[in-house]
């Protein structure tokens, strides 16, 4: 009976490992504005994302100003200024500010019935470009409006199911990881042969890490499969990878812990039998 109970707990452990990692990620990574901004910050240097920001911001500015026969030249100048600005530290600062502001909209899309897209507002970027152009004495720069222009990087027809899952994961929070550790300890503690149970528990943790890795890949394919035509696929891929970077790192950490525990249990058994 003790062996059967230990085996059942190890099987439960395989499922709890990915669920606890995702629950912690949803509650502490996506739900926290500082961690969300830090995860999105490297995208400031991603070429696909930069191209989307430059194109959309330039288009938003051009739609708001009219300088008659000089329109073409001004639009060309703005495009050049935007592309030059995209490689500066000021752009990265503006990017972080835009993502910090977008965090609220991101959470609303996942926790309420409002919105069906992941977006960010390029107004901070436009404000920085305008300030630099005005300082450089560029004609008509003072007429550039700082408009709130949202860029969609992911959009879905129905986020209802995803919202429900996200809410459940947020409720689980840190409690599910604590439960996972408790199950792992119990699987070893109740076993008749604890060294073998430690090996089994370690392999169960490693299997859970592999299951988490597979889930991240499958969800990536599903999330990017039916993107609308106005959403840049490369930019959407970059955003998904940035948001799930914590989970991919967790896979390797948990895999290493599981394999180390299994090896430790196996080695202890070998040393015990050595005369």
Image: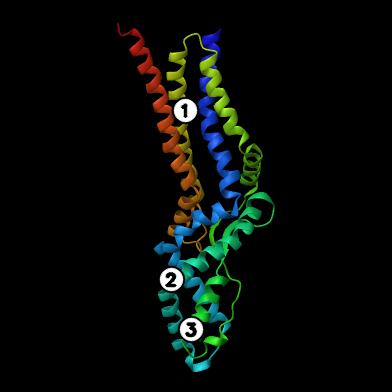
Q: Please give the name of the residue rendered at 51% of the width and 73% of the height, measured from the top-left corner.
A: 57
Report x, y in % for residue 272.
36, 10
Distance Cα–Cα, label 2 vs label 3: 14 Å
Name the image quarter holding the N terminus. Answer: top right
Residue receiving disc 1: 205
Mark 2 and mark 3 lie on one chain; the one further toward the N terminus is 2
Q: Please give the name of the residue rendered at 61% of the width and 72% of the height, measured from the top-left corner.
A: 148
Q: Please give the name of the residue rendered at 61% of the width and 37% of the height, measured from the top-left corner.
A: 174
Element on which disc 3 rests: helix
Query: Is 133 placed above or below 85 here?
Result: below
Query: Is 218 placed above or below 184 here?
Result: below
Residue 86 is labelled as: 2
Query: Is 181 placed above or below 253 here?
Result: above
Report x, y in % for residue 35.
54, 52
Residue 217 seen in render: no
Q: Residue furthest front?
A: 275
Residue 133 is labelled as: 3
Report x, y in % for residue 122.
55, 69
Mark 1 and mark 3 lie on one chain; the one further toward the N terminus is 3
Q: Residue furthest right?
A: 113
Q: Are marks 1 and 3 in contact (CB under 8 Å)?
A: no
Element on which disc 1 rests: helix
Element on which disc 2 rests: loop
């Amino acid at each position: 009976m003790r062996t059967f109970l230990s085996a059942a707990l190890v099987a439960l452990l395989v499922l709890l490992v990915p669920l606890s990692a995702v629950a912690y990620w949803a509650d502490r990574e996506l739900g926290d504005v500082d961690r969300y901004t830090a995860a999105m910050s490297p995208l400031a240097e991603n070429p696909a994302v930069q191209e989307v920001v430059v194109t959309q911001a330039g288009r938003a500015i051009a739609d708001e100003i009219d300088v008659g026969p000089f329109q073409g030249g001004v639009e060309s100048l703005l495009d050049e200024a935007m592309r030059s600005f995209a490689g500066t530290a000021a752009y990265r600062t503006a990017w972080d500010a835009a993502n910090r502001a977008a965090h609220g909209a991101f959470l609303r899309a996942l926790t309420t019935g409002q919105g069906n897209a992941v977006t960010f507002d390029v107004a901070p970027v436009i404000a920085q470009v305008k300030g630099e152009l005005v300082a450089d004495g560029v004609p008509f720069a003072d007429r550039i409006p700082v408009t709130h222009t949202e860029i969609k990087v992911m959009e879905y027809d129905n986020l209802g199911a995803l919202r429900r899952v996200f809410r459940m994961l947020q409720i689980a929070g840190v409690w599910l990881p604590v439960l996972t550790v408790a199950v792992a300890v119990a699987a070893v503690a109740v076993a008749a042969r604890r060294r073998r149970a430690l090996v089994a528990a370690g392999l169960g943790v490693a299997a859970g890490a592999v299951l988490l890795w597979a889930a991240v890949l499958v969800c990536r394919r599903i999330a990017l499969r039916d993107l609308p035509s106005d959403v840049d696929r490369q930019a959407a891929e970059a955003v998904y990878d940035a948001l799930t970077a914590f989970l991919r790192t967790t896979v390797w950490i948990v895999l290493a812990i599981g394999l180390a525990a299994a090896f430790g249990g196996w080695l202890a058994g070998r040393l015990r039998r050595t005369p």
